[in-house]
Amino acid sequence: MNLPQIEYGPVDWERQWPEEDKPDEERNQFEIDRARIIHSAAFRRLQGKTQVFVSGSGDFFRTRLTHSLETAQIGKGLALRLGANPDLLETICLTHDLGHPPFGHTGEDALNRCMHDYGGFEGNAQNLRLISRLSTKFLERDGLNLTRATIDGILKYKKPYEPGLPKFYYQEDQPLVDWVCKFGSYNDKSFDCQLMDWADEIAYSVHDLEDGMKSGMITSARLLAARKFRKSVDEGHWNWMLKQVQFVENQSGERNRKAARKVLTSRLIHEFIGATNRSEIAVAEGTSARYRYRLEVDPLQRARCGVLKKVMFRLIVDDARVATLENKAERIVEGLFSVFSHLEERTGLLFPEDFRDVWEAADDAGKIRTACDYIAGMTDDYAERVYARLFIPQAGSIYSL
């Protein structure tokens, strides 16, 4: 496929705050954004955050960091196929999960419940907060000062928080959203965001299938035993799914099964990327070219990707072994919030120094949001250690954090 390249311009690589040009800077603006993400503390912490299997379950299983790297690789492939900027897509994909808290979606749901009366919590909304407020790079201002195109690429949900709304951005980020959408749309995703979203779906479904087969949770026997689930899936898609798993199982020896898992994931990714095209739509004058296109995905391949995701939820997320750990994760997040959201003066002493400064300067609502920010930034292991230090007798010392 040889599609014309999308024409990115000044409105796409504009930053909120002007920066002095560096002499002999050879990188384009999106490469600079990518470097800022990779060197951020939030990006490093992804190595200790759950993807599906809790961090520490084994050195094979994916974390939020490895998932983000794999999503970026797929996103770059989509960009090369569909005429988007590969540096921009890679940057967006590396950024898309920065805001997710410890313990995966379980931690996200628990923290959102805790913040129900205080503006909510949502991983994608936290992305904006991280790159614009919580990350540090400049002496004179907060945030990473990323380009409009990069921020718009991670802005999947363009509605402000309301209780009961599942996906949103925080009300206090309205000025940032207004700036981002100035040459775009408050209703539609940019083309780059659409590509990131599909890359995320591919990586999530295909690589979690690989992890599930490696763990022994996704097998043909367990699929055949899940009769109620089978009835909820189209028969053709079901047979296709079973065939993929049996392809791996039919290999003799773990070495060959390992190779077969890689053959399978490589083939699926290739097919899901190859199932894409773009269509052109009319946009208002002055709108960025990033809104001139819509991603088209072959319905059969989109449905197959969706079946992989359903299998992952049915055989892994709903498994008693995983559910037990999720119950533990909920208790940890809720327990941490119960302590750090207290508004009494001594609560500030429990925070590390950088968060303590913010907490002490904030009003009551700001103090609760600071508690949320602190918990959301924790890795799984760090959250467990802080919880143990606060709630378990004889756990921890002055040197343990």
Image (cartoon, rainbow, N blue to C red):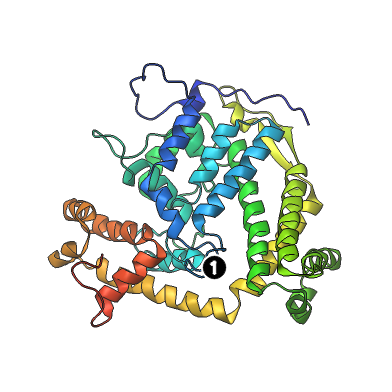
Classify residue 242 by image quadrant: bottom right
In the image, what residue occupies the spot 47% across and 68% down?
56
Classify residue 261 by image quadrant: bottom right
Classify residue 86 by image quadrant: top right
Image location (x, y in percent) of residue 186: 52, 40
Q: Is residue 141 visible?
A: yes
In the drawing, does residue 161 fall left or right of residue 88?
left
Above or below, 30 relative to 259:
above
Q: Which residue position is annotated with label 1?
A: 53
Q: Is residue 155 visible?
A: no
Image location (x, y in percent) of residue 131: 39, 43
Among all residues in the image, which is located at the extreme top? 23
Element at label 1: loop
In the rendered image, the quadrant that contains the N terminus is top right
In the image, what residue occupies the spot 30% across and 57% down?
369
Image location (x, y in percent) of residue 122: 45, 57
In the image, what residue occupies the spot 77% across and 42% down?
274
In the rendered image, the quadrant that contains the C terminus is bottom left
Above or below, 329 relative to 135:
below
Decide which of 233, 320 is in the foreground and name it: 320
Residue type at the position of mark 1: Phe
Decide which of 306, 400 is in the foreground and name it: 400
